[in-house]
Every structure is written in C-alpha cells, then in structure tokens.
Amino acid sequence: NRIVVLAGGVGGSRFVRGVRRACPEAQLDVVVNTADDITLHGLRVCPDLDTMMYALGGGIDDEKGWGRAAETWSIMDELKAYAVEPTWFALGDRDIATHLVRTQLIAAGATPTEITAALCHRWLDDERLRLLPMTDDRVETHVVVEDPQTASGRRAMHFQEFWVRHHAAPKVRQVLQVGIETATATAEVLTAIERADLVLVGPSNPVVSIGPVLATGGVRPALRATGAKVVGVSGILGGAPVLGMADKLLPAIGVAVDAGAVGLHYGARTSTAEGILDAWLVHETDTAAAERCTAAGLPTRAVPLLMTTPDHTAEFVRAGVALAAETA
Ligand code: GDP
Ligand code: FO1
Ligand code: CA
C-alpha cells in the first residue's frame, strides 16, 4: 500500500511522523515544498526538506521544530565578528554541513532529487520512506509588503526575510512564487501520485507550503487523475494556525483564515473546477466549517487535529483513511 503526503517543514514533519505511526508498513513518499529555499553565504539552504529529513531521522531540535539537535553556533558568531550579513538567518554549525554537501553536489551537477536522496541516505534507514522535492527547478517564494519608506509604498523580499527577519510584521499585499510558471514536477513525484493508494495533503501552510506544491507544473492534473483518494487536513484550527504565519498570508491570496475556506480553496475533486480533494478533516471545534464544506460537495469531518504526539496525529490520520474509504 502506497501513500503520498504533500507537506512543508515543521507542521508537515509532525504530520508525517503521525502517518508513519498509523501506517508503519506503507510505502511513504513525501512530496516536500522547495519554495522556501534560499542561498545564504554561498550555501543553498532547503528549510522544509531539511526539517523533514532531521525530524524523520531523529536529528531535529524538537523544541524549535527546525534545525539540528544539540546545535552550536560558532560559525554564525565568526560571521558576525566579520560583520558579514545576513546575520538574521541562523545557520548552526551542524546544519551547515548539510548545506555544504548540498552546495557541492549542485556544483557537481546533481539534481535536488538526487541530492535529497544522498543526504537522506544518512538519516533514513527505512527503505519505504522517501523525501521528494516537488521539483528540480528553482522556485522561491517572495512577498510584496507595505513599506512607507519606499516611493511606491511597497517592497518585495524573500519569504524567509519576511518571516525570520521581520517576524511577519509588515502587511502582505502579494505572494509570488518566482519561477513557478516554468517549474515542473519531477518524474518521481508524478509517478508516486499516479501509483498511490492514498494521497494526504498535510496541515502545512496553504499559501507557502502546499500552495507551491500544487502550483508546480503537473501536480494538480496528477492529483485530479490519480485512482487514489485525496484527503486533506486543516492546519487552521478555530480560525488560527497552530504555529507560523498562515494568518498573515491567507488574506493576501483572498482566502479567509478559516478551516472551511481553506478546504474550499483546495476544492472538491468532483467539482468541474480545479479541485483536488475527496475529503477534508477539520478540528473538532470547527463543526460549522465541516457542515459548510460538506454542503458544498466536499465530504468533511470534524475530529481532534492537534499534533501533540505522533500517537495523537496517528489517531486523526486513521480518521482520514476511514473517511476516504467512505467517499464514493
Ligand atoms: P513550515 O514549513 O515549517 O512553516 O511548516 P508547514 O507549512 O509544514 O506547517 C505549518 C502549518 O502547520 C501551520 O500553518 C499550522 O497551521 C500547521 N500546524 C502546526 N501544528 C499543528 C497541529 O498541531 N495540528 C494541525 N492540524 N496543524 C498544525
Ligand atoms: N527560523 C527562524 O525563525 N529563524 C532562523 O534563524 C531560522 C534558521 C533556519 C535555518 C535552517 C533551517 O532549515 C530552518 C531555519 N528556520 C529558521 C526555520 C525556517 O525559516 C522556517 O520555519 C520555515 O522555512 C517556514 O516555513
Ligand atoms: Ca516552509
């Protein structure tokens, strides 16, 4: 039995740990967002892939949810002593080894898919677990924010600069996926979706994690064509994201910060439009959202969605599997 999960970083990796707990025997292919990627100090950094890899490999800093456990910061301190910018993005000593390997492999001509497999060789000894970058093409999320200091009143910056440097404080006018128009999903991603028995859209950020995956060339048609059931999980609980800045980004793409609005944004696969979901899970308290989605043709169930432990997560993954089986 084959499961494909679409995911971002911190939320996505917590979700995948629960999926592994619920379905320990399944072939699990995780399609990971790469639009958060950024080049700093000459190093290519892939936050969502690394977060997923460290989390599943037991090397994550569990408290932060990203970066290496027992990290040290000597290199950052040295860069600060040289007054070399950017200093707002913290690269740990252990983490930097990952970026050194990746950057060298890029220079040697390897694709992100090949590089991810090479890095995962160290971390994942489970042959039935693969991390797949959504594309081998370069895509980067940038945001246009309000900035009264500029002549136009606006300014564009990389998503990481908005989130990490400015703590998501400026008002977002526009979210751009630079490079998405020409980016295509890898053969590995398209084949995994085609052959899947179940596709799970994780509770990851709908705008900057799931959004880029769905916008990558070939992904949406593959999801609409697959024989697998496609089940989504809301990351918006009670009108707010559990963590992160989805509440700052959803309004910029015209979607309310509400589990029902996000479900209908992904859309029902049965509809004539571009929908991708057969079923949708919302939090136990979001019963109005569940009714609204179900009435609109998207079968939705309200269950506890807090990923407190992998066991809690596994519990609602099983509810999603059951709901998928019920839908015609
Ligand atoms: P990032 O790439 O590190 O930002 O992580 P993701 O995009 O994969 O996940 C972030 C999203 O996960 C947030 O927008 C939250 O809404 C969602 N999230 C975080 N914790 C939980 C949780 O316990 N339950 C659910 N359902 N969603 C969560
Ligand atoms: N998040 C921060 O808030 N501050 C950082 O300095 C930071 C560094 C960092 C380095 C490597 C990495 O893989 C992730 C890192 N993150 C950091 C997390 C990351 O920026 C975000 O949580 C996600 O990309 C948001 O989707
Ligand atoms: Ca991310």
Image (tube, rainbow, N blue to C red):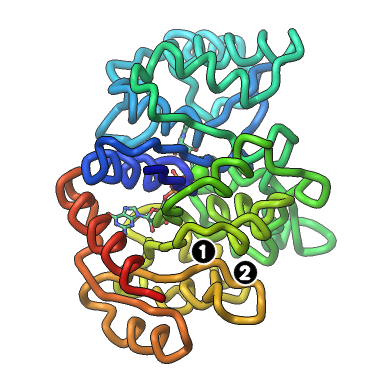
Task: Write down the residue under mark 1.
Answer: 248
Question: Which amino acid type is shown beneath numbered disc 2?
Answer: Ala
Give x and y (percent) for residue 42.
Answer: 69, 16
Task: State the residue at coordinates (55%, 41%).
Answer: 192
253 is higher (above) or lower (below) than 210 = below
Give the position of the N terminus as an image quadrant.
Answer: top left
* Residue plotted at (44% across, 41% down): 9
Q: Is residue 20 above or below residue 216?
A: above
Q: Which mark is residue 252?
A: 2
- Please, what secondary structure does the residue beneath circle 2 have? helix
Residue 125 image offset from top left, x and y in percent: 34, 17
- The location of residue 94, given as percent across then percent down, is 42, 12
* Quarter-of-image position of residue 134: top right
Q: Establish if 283 lies above or below 19.
A: below
Q: Are marks 1 and 2 in contact (CB under 8 Å)?
A: yes
Asked whether, in this view, residue 184 is left or right of residue 209, the answer is right
Q: Residues within 10 Å of mark 2 (few under 14, many from 20)?
A: some
Query: In which quadrant of the rendered view does residue 133 lie?
Result: top right
Mark 1 surroundings: few (<14), some (14-19) or many (≥20) residues within 10 A: some
Q: Residue at x 75, y 11 (%)?
A: 107
Q: Nearer the viewer, residue 84 or 225?
A: 225
Residue depicted at x 33% and y 38%: 26
Q: Residue 113 sits in which quadrant?
A: top right
- Which element carries disc 1, helix, strand or loop? helix
Q: How many labels sit on residues?
A: 2
Query: Between 235 and 150, which is closer to the camera in this rendering?
Result: 235
